[in-house]
Amino acid sequence: MPYDIEKTSLAIALAGSLLAGSVAYAYEPVDALPNLSGYPTRLLVDGLPVEGAAPLYAEDQVLFPLRAIAEGGDYTVLWEEASRRITLDGEKNDYQIDTASGTLFQDGKELFQDDALRIQGGSTYVSPELFDHVAGIDAAWDAATNTAVVTTETPDDNVYVYDLGEGALQNPSRPDTSYRMQGVIGVPEGENCPVVIFLHGSHPVEKAVENRYDLGFFYLVNQLADAVYLALSMNVAINYSFEDGEPSGCDRTVQVVEQQSELLRRAIAGEQGIFPCDLTGKGDLSRVILVGHSRAGTDILTVADKTEILGIQGLISVAPSMVSPLEGTPVDVPTGIIIPQYDGDVTSLDGGKLFDEVESAEGRASDAELIYLKKGDHSGFSTALVRPDPFSSQEERQQVMERQAQQTFLSAYVVDFVEQVLEDGHTPFAGETVLPEEYSGCDVVLRVDEKSQVLFQAGEESRPEVTAENLTADWVVASSTLEFPQSSGSVMLREIEAVG
């Protein structure tokens, strides 16, 4: 499907991660919330996807699948053919819907008139507003992620979408900025579990409270909770929004993380009524791994440096974007960085620069490793980014791996990283004598912080033949562009043991 970039003001364009790769490129401005009606929709109920049901675009509006949402809220859905009426049979409340008129009733009283109700393909679709009148269900449409976000009073799993109320972010020269403290949390069965926190990047935002990119990592939150970690994905969209003035760096993100972490600390200590679940004794905030995608892939270094609540043990930076130099010396904790080959958002592949800055920091003692993910792209790591990378071509998109494979790759690495770092303080590939060329079924090129030196750089056409006594020479891909996937390389010389 062709991708159309809609023009608007340059100020809005700079707000999103679509330009976050490198300001040196003369990119066209893009609309804050592009039209996604040509892309698949999805339905999340209590943070988890519902298979076989999806919202429907119809006549310039979005309609929600009635049965899937009602059943997610523990209603039994009954169809009466003669009257063409639907009954929502709940434990405490019953509702009737006249499909001919679109009228919602309770005990004979008319509650809502849904003129958009339609039956298509044997399924009934209704306006999101209808659920404003159904007890125990909250449903909203997120136009930025093409997602119907539904929360109920009775989640089926250990994943909860939360709203902790209104918070206030301090500004240096104006009144506080109000925002909603939102996210998704996965609760493990154990106690004193390590904590993993995910931060999303800068993507098109209209309203931070409505554009829920934090839900793009629900699959990781769910898997980590099952693996006995307390996992959260926080909504930090306010840091990338011009609501209440232009943000300053990642200062808002730091405050969001600190404020939510303080509430998390209180909930773990036993205070009730903060989160929609009991977190008493569930987490250990002295053992925390931060994971950041896109802009947050570099913001996590600042968060780790400035947090006063969290004991950061490791960092994972996924397709990072560096829009400004790092603040101070990178925190000295094990760090993993992932660069997707066909990153059509951060086309400058900033992860390489970030790795260089991290591993060359003065006095650094912790491991750092860089994973070049072949056939990966920028958006495939997050389920909330439904469009292909904005500055990639159709030809390039055909080379990109399936999103599910890319998400499986990230899941495997996050779990391995967390386990290894918390076990012995090392990254997964540190100490390996032979670095693998495949991981989690994906082709990769790995670089681990070691005593190596780049001695030669050239294109493939002038690839050198280098030999030396007591040295081994390896040709590796050092950089990549969308036009030339292996446009330059390096010869890495490493000292080896003398033979005899």
Image (spheres, rainbow, N blue to C red):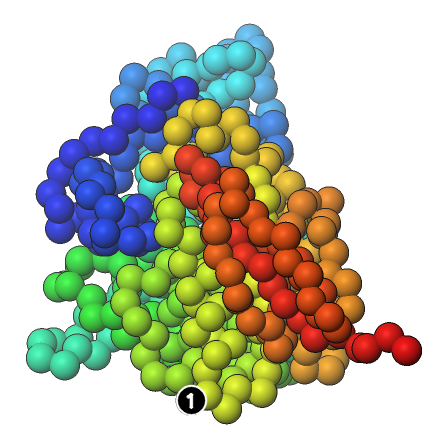
Counting every numbered tag in the picture gives 1
Quadrant where the image shows the N terminus: top left
Q: Nearer the viewer, residue 430 or 164?
A: 430
Q: Residue at x 45, y 38 (%)?
A: 484
Q: Is residue 169 above or below residue 389?
A: below
Q: Nearer the viewer, residue 34 or 190?
A: 34
Q: Quadrant of residue 350?
A: bottom left
Q: Nearer the viewer, residue 285 or 55?
A: 285
Q: Is residue 173 above or below residue 433?
A: below
Secondary structure, mark 1, is loop
User: Looking at the image, can residue 298 be seen?
Assistant: yes
- With 456 as the anchor, is 405 left or right in this view? right
Q: Nearer the viewer, residue 195 or 336?
A: 336
Tell me residue 306's x, y (percent): 38, 84
Quadrant where the image shows the C terminus: bottom right
Q: Give the residue type at disc 1.
A: Glu
Q: Is residue 100 above or below residue 179?
A: above
Q: Residue at x 56, y 13 (%)?
A: 122
Q: Residue at x 54, y 31 (%)?
A: 399
- With 468 as the anchor, is 57 left or right in this view? left
Q: Quadrant of residue 390?
A: top left
- View extreme (right): residue: 500
- With 196 as the anchor, is 178 left or right in this view? left
Dot 1: within a 10 Å radius of its alpha carbon, few (fewer than 14), some, or many (20 or more) residues? few
Tell me residue 414's x, y (percent): 63, 62
Tell me residue 82's x, y (percent): 55, 8
User: Looking at the image, can residue 134 be seen?
Assistant: no
Q: Residue at x 62, y 39 (%)?
A: 404
Tell me residue 89's x, y (percent): 58, 35
- Residue underneath mark 1: 308
